Image (spheres, rainbow, N blue to C red):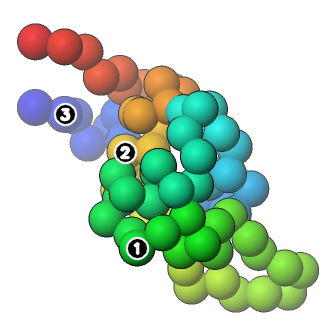
Amino acid sequence: MIEKSKLLLISPSAAQVKAARESTDLSTEEIALLFGLADGSSWRKKEIQKAGSNNKRLLKPMEYEMLLLLSDTHPNLKIIEK
């Protein structure tokens, strides 16, 4: 069971999403498939935010938690094998 206090539960910026994805060493195509998206261009939209833009395509807080776990960059949690 995960303690709620260990979760970040934040809405990430496009730059945070891109940095975390790059830490996975996965391409936008590969990460898109893991997250159930059609293709890499769907994922790239999550990594782009123009000044003054209110991009609604960013990751949801729990999606970002999973991305941080996949990239092994979550500050409080780590995936381990059973």
Q: CA distance from mark 3 to mark 1?
A: 30 Å
Which dot marks residue 2? 3
Cα separation, mark 2 vs mark 1, equals 19 Å
Q: Residue 7, percent across and down? A: 36, 42
Q: Identify residue for label 1.
A: 38
Marks 2, 1: nearer the viewer: 1
Tell me the quadrant of the picture where the N terminus can be found: top left
For the point 58% across and 55% down, which residue is it? 28
**Contact (Cβ within 8 Å) of mark 3 with mark 2:** no
Callout 2 environment at 10 Å: few (<14), some (14 to 19), or many (20+)? some
Neighbour class for label 1 at 10 Å: few (<14), some, many (≥20)? few
Q: Tell me the residue that label 2 is attached to.
A: 66
What residue type is disc 2 on? Met
The image's mark for residue 52 is none
Q: Is residue 21 left or right of residue 52?
A: left
- Is 2 placed left or right of 63 in the picture? left
Q: Amino acid at mark 1?
A: Ala
Residue 44 to residue 27: above or below: below
Q: Mark 2 touching mark 1, by CB under 8 A?
A: no
Q: Where is the C terminus found, in terms of image quarters?
A: top left
The answer to the question of whether label 3 and label 1 lie on touching residues, with beta carbons closer than 8 A, is no
Q: Position of residue 24 (x, y in %)?
A: 54, 33
